[in-house]
Amino acid sequence: MKNNSMLEIKNLHASVDDKEILKGIDLKVNAGEVHAIMGPNGSGKSTLAEVIAGQEEFEVGEGNILLEGEDLEELSPEERAHKGVFLSFQYPVEIPGVSVTNFMKTAINESRKAQGLEDMPANEMLKKIREKSEMLEIDRKFLSRSLNEGFSGGEKKRNEIFQMAMMEPKLAILDETDSGLDIDALRIVANGVNKLRSKDNAIIVITHYQRLLEYIVPDFVHVLYNGKIVKSGTKELALELEEKGYDWLKEEAAV
Amino acid sequence: MAYTEEELKKELETKEYEYGFYTDIESDTLPKGLNEEIVIAISKKKEEPDWMTEWRLEAFRAWQEMEEPEWANVTYKKPDFQDISYYSAPNKKPKYNSLDEVDPELLETFKKLGISVDEQKKLAGVAVDIVMDSVSVATTFKKTLAEKGIIFCSISEAIQEHPELVKKYLGTVVPKKDNFYAALNSAVFSDGSFCYIPKGVRCPMELSTYFRINQAGTGQFERTLVVAEEGSYVSYLEGCTAPMRDENQLHAAVVELIALDDAEIKYSTVQNWYPGNDQGKGGVFNFVTKRGLCEKNAKISWTQVETGSAVTWKYPSCILKGDHSIGEFYSIAVTNNFQQADTGTKMVHLGKNTKSTIISKGISAGQSQNSYRGLVQVNSRAENARNFSQCDSLLMGNRCGAHTFPYIEAKNKTAQIEHEATTSKIGEDQIFYCNQRGIDTEKAIALIVNGFSKEVLNKLPMEFAVEAQKLLEISLEGSVG
Ligand SMILES: Nc1ncnc2c1ncn2[C@@H]1O[C@H](COP(=O)(O)OP(=O)(O)OP(=O)(O)O)[C@@H](O)[C@H]1O
Ligand SMILES: [Mg+2]
């Protein structure tokens, strides 16, 4: 059996201020796959995403997170990023005075440095920026604005995916990237994500809506409820959820 | 500075205050202490004319009657003015024609500073007048400038060669008795720069001076005088680094700028005197008086990046005397560990339709105290004077302090004065966001600080902006956590 595991999470528990939020998560994502995670508000979806990314605010108790077989426990958030973990934030953060371009340049060169590579030559960087911004239909002027400062909700999300395109991660976690995007933007951004799909990377899509999954078609859908994955299935599960809501699962989970 | 990004990064990897080394050059030093004999001796050593000696003595007598100011938001052990040697010049001081003649130790110093004269010479468009321990030891590009009638030399040389200009302008903007430190400087100033741009001439290059304190226990009293004749333009850069020392070193400079009708002076400073170690020991005391006078339609811009000194007391000011004149002040002041800075500006609107802009960015880390103190004064006949002030403070950690003291005195009803102030902290969420993109915390802070300071960094000439960014990063190293 060939081993193409990208992410493997085993019995993961995480808490903040002694309050347990993740209560034993198991998840396996192979390279080339797209997984969707759905679930009610407050069920722990963003927490799971941030814990994978190494947010130290959360205390990881039991359990392991393996990226391509390597345990991430001892690694800082930046080291995880260098290994190819990317998080598209549910709430992207503003950094005044730092342009999108400058931020990306710094991010890419820091990752290259960690891999023992030289800085990316300026012309290559500019070419890449041009390509990726065209793919996501981002106006070049936008790239010289301060990162996320004064961006509309949709602009912030599109910009997150622009960053994903620039960083070319192995494992991308998109936390409610669809919220805030208008209908056209959703299509553009989703198409962008699809272009980034390959057999060598994996994507986890966190969303509340089936609509996004019509564009980014998942191989598997999981439902996170009260800190646990209570149901997994194929893309049909998302349709079922859309129709029935979560109540029936709550009953199932309580059993 | 012609730093490549790679060099920059390498430098950043060094955690120590890099410029903390001491050049062992023989010095010719006067005995410690200050009295009329010493003042006369300084003047004699510099072979000054009698009027200059007399000028110094007047200043000294005034100084004796004055009290050291107490109003600034800084606390420090007052220097013992009788325990300082007021004159120190490198022993061998011939005028050099080529680098080969320069003391190899001095060249070594420049190398460590990353500003070898050699490199500077190649750096097109920058003429450097290096003030090493009070006496200028090298001046380059003088010829090119001379062709345009521009004078750029040490103030001592100017006193010898252009006494009529010095006599006419010295002390006209910062009078001898202006304040305690200015009076002290007027009495004992050892050297500094003089710059004169003739009518209608645009100075073709950035004029720049690198200052450096060297001799142990030697106070440094620089005197700079820049005169821009009608319709002329000059951009002047001043930068400095100082060696690591245990005892506090006093620095009390005076800078006077005169912009005649339609003239423009840009004065940029990157200040990096030794700030003391992380225990708050040592460091330079920097008490500076900088002031510019604008005649009709003239413009003066002060841009400063202050990262050094244990104690900084500095208020570059503009006297907007002429109608339609413009004064600008762009400042970044960084304090870390136990540093204290009380800095800001004074905009004095005397003429009609005068305009001033103040952008101040204060960054405090460690247990430092960072104060902005600004005065906007509008005289009764200054119709339609306008000022815009913006003071932003960025705090790192919760043991440091940021303070803003804006003073407004408007005696004319038509004045329009706007003041905005913000205080922010670097957020954990910002750091995590950067970390997630592969940027470590140290670098993330540098990035956020650079972003915060951008409006001011943008005002600096290119090569200086790079130097300044590097200094910001170095000065905030170890301030995390
Ligand atoms: N730093 C924190 N301190 C206290 N509680 C927290 C913290 N972070 C998250 N929580 C709590 O953990 C729970 C899970 O939050 P999380 O953000 O992971 O939910 P979510 O599934 O992403 O919800 P949504 O769909 O609304 O985005 C919530 O009850 C939230 O209030
Ligand atoms: Mg969430």
Image (cartoon, coloured by chain):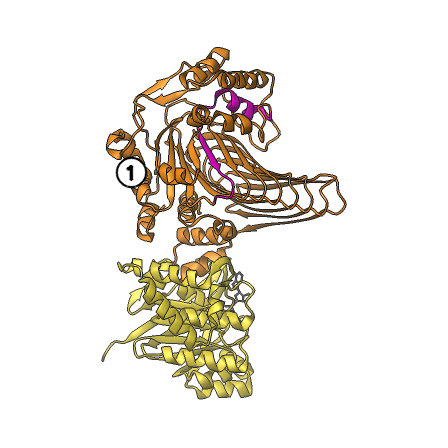
B41 above or below B155? above
Q: Quadrant of the N terminus of chain A?
A: bottom left
Report the front residue among A212 and B149.
B149
Report the front residue among A39 and B148.
B148
Going by the numbered disc 1, the residue's amino acid type is Lys
- Which chain is drawn using orange? B
Q: Which residues are magenta?
A: B178-201
Residue B191 in sight here: no
Q: Residue B156 is drawn in which quadrant?
A: top left
- Which chain is drawn using yellow? A
Q: Is residue B276 a member of the stretch shown in magenta?
A: no
The residue labelled by disc 1 is: B111
User: Please, which residue is most extreme toward the right here?
Assistant: B413
Percent position (x, y) of residue A139? Answer: 48, 72
Q: Chain of mark 1?
A: B
Identify which residue is drawn at 53% across, 16% down: B54
Residue A68 in sight here: yes
Report the front residue among A81 and B452.
B452
Identify which residue is drawn at 49% across, 66% down: A21
Percent position (x, y) of residue B186? Answer: 52, 23
Percent position (x, y) of residue B53? Answer: 50, 16
